[in-house]
Image (cartoon, rainbow, N blue to C red):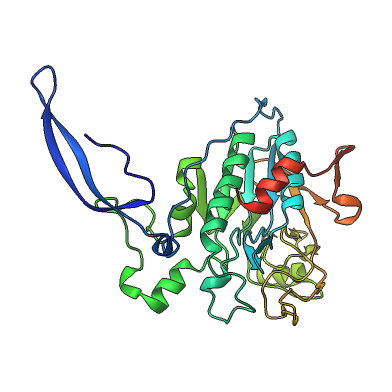
Amino acid sequence: MEGKGPENSRIVSSWNGLTKNKDNECEIHLLHKYEPISNDEEHNFLSQAAPTIINSAEVAPRRSKTLLLADIPDPHYEFRNINGILTPIHDPNVMDVSLQIIKKEQPNIIIVGGDDLDLPQLGKYEMDSLHFVDTLQLAIDGLHKYYARLRADNPNAEIKSLNGNHNRFGKYILRHAPYLFGLKRANMSEDWATNALPFFLRLDELEIEHVESYQINDRLLTFHGDLADRNSTASKYLSRYDTSIMYHHDHRRGYERRVFPSGKAIEAFGFGCQCDISGSVPSYNSSIDSRGNPVPRYENWNNGMGFVEFSKGDKPFKIEAIPIERQDGYLAIHDHKVYKPRPDVVEMLRTGK
């Protein structure tokens, strides 16, 4: 009979077995042979996040003639292990405040704007420290729990996860093990590759679609983006495209509008990020001091989220940027209500458990 294997074990072979039921009919059962995994060996494996079910209070769907989109920019979910203490480089307080606001509004569409995992372990540049050794599985598991909560809180929403430049699984495999690139489970040609980010995060099971870009309506397109200009990233996009753009990647709130001689107007805007903005995110400018701690560095990154109210077709849209301030214990004000972090959810996001 098919069953669950012993704890801390792995499958080494599988086969089909036949038995007869009470009606004398043959039934096929998938059988497995297991072997134990030693404590040292167990840490060498990277696996899918364990399936997570989070129960949330019932919510009424949004009822309006217009559609509402919520944007969650650049979480960079990951942990540093600093002298045995796990420190997130995502910002649990910002992420939780955003979860609360989104649940209250019940948008029709939720966009996670890319770089949901940071993945410094798989980058082509040297890491700034050994803080990220053996933290990747925890990050995968914790981000899956975050997505499970986002889905539970918003059961009626379409959720889109944009591909970002920090999704490094594919490039890492191509550099170090090209023959494993795109490898899928047997006879599952339509499934994600077993070394792809959506597979590790179980996005399909949460009904979250992983996409390169998303056309919000005929006037507005969103993607992760590739520009970061200290003066105005929004202006750079307006010079590149002839349609309105909701971008991510640069971790800053920004807005610009361009009017063509014909009278046509386009806009470009971003809502910031939901990662730590004090210097812990590994980057070209990050560094570690002699005590092994990240050196504080403020690059004018902005924590926040945003909403876009729109209608289908070639119709105008309305944007709302929501700053999430680090002062006074983190808070945001939306629709005349003050939102503050919830300690239990922050602890889950802080530890990944």
Q: Is residue 205 left or right of residue 148?
A: left
Q: Is residue 176 left or right of residue 85?
A: left
Question: Residue 132, image x and y in percent?
Answer: 59, 69
Question: Residue 120, image x and y in percent?
Answer: 58, 71
Q: Is residue 118 above or below residue 49?
A: below
Q: Residue furthest top?
A: 23
Can you tell which quarter of the image residue 233 is in? bottom right
At x 69%, y 50%, the residue is 71
Question: Residue 97, image x and y in percent?
Answer: 77, 45
Residue toward you, 126 or 8: 8
Question: Residue 250, image x and y in percent?
Answer: 71, 68
- Is there any visible trace of residue 353 in the rendered image? yes
Q: Is residue 312 above or below residue 303?
A: above
At x 60%, y 75%, the residue is 130
- Is there any visible trace of residue 267 in the rendered image? no
In which quadrant is the N terminus drawn? top left
Residue toward you, 49 or 206: 49
Q: Is residue 230 left or right of residue 127?
A: right
At x 32%, y 39%, the residue is 4
Can you tell which quarter of the image residue 277 is in? bottom right
Q: How many marks?
A: 0
At x 12%, y 30%, the residue is 19
Q: Residue furthest front?
A: 39
